[in-house]
Structure formats: structure tokens, C-alpha cells
Image: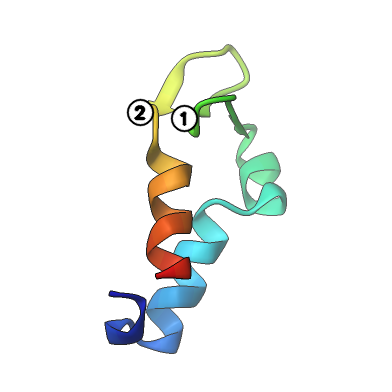
Amino acid sequence: MATKLTSSERDALHKAISAPFLEDQGWHEGSHGEILNDRGRTIFEIGYAKAIRKILCA
């Protein structure tokens, strides 16, 4: 699947789960790949970051 992504699409997905981007938003990644805000509320469900990593490595 990753071979079908354009470089800008790959870059966008990489940025979406990068520590600097998450930090700039006041978010962080939980232990199960979920994205949480500064109050611990779920922004993106369990598996979000892990799924993106799988897509990028495929």
C-alpha cells in the first residue's frame, strides 16, 4: 500500500504521528497508539498511530 502513496501523502502521514507535531498540538501518543490531548481525552482511537506506521512501512 505504501508504494501507492505519493511522497506528499507519506510526509503528511508521518507528520500526523510525529512527536514534534503532537507536542505542538498539546497531544501525545498513548501506549496503544491512541492520540490523547493534554487532559488525557482521546483525540484518535486506539491503534491510530500504529496503523499509520504499518501503512508507512508496508
Local packing at callout 2 (Cα closer than 10 Å; few below 14, some 14-19, many 20+) is: few
What percent of the width, then of the height, locates residue 57? 47, 68
Q: Is residue 40 above or below residue 8?
A: above
User: What residue does disc 1 label?
Assistant: 34
- Which residue sits at x=51%, y=75%? 11
- Which residue sits at x=55%, y=51%? 17
Q: Amino acid at mark 1?
A: Glu
| SS state under label 2 | loop
Count of labels in the image:
2
Where residue 45 is drawn, which disc sits there?
2
Q: Is residue 13 left or right of residue 26?
A: left
What percent of the width, then of the height, locates residue 6? 36, 87
| SS state under label 1 | loop
What percent of the width, then of the height, locates residue 7? 45, 87
Give the camera-side residue of 14 and 50.
Answer: 50
- Which residue sits at x=63%, y=54%? 18
Give whichever of discs 1 and 2 has the lower sequence position.
1
Q: Is residue 9 left or right of residue 1?
A: right
Here the colouring is: rainbow
Q: Is residue 15 above or below residue 4?
A: above
Q: Quadrant of the N terminus?
A: bottom left
- Which residue sits at x=50%, y=55%? 16
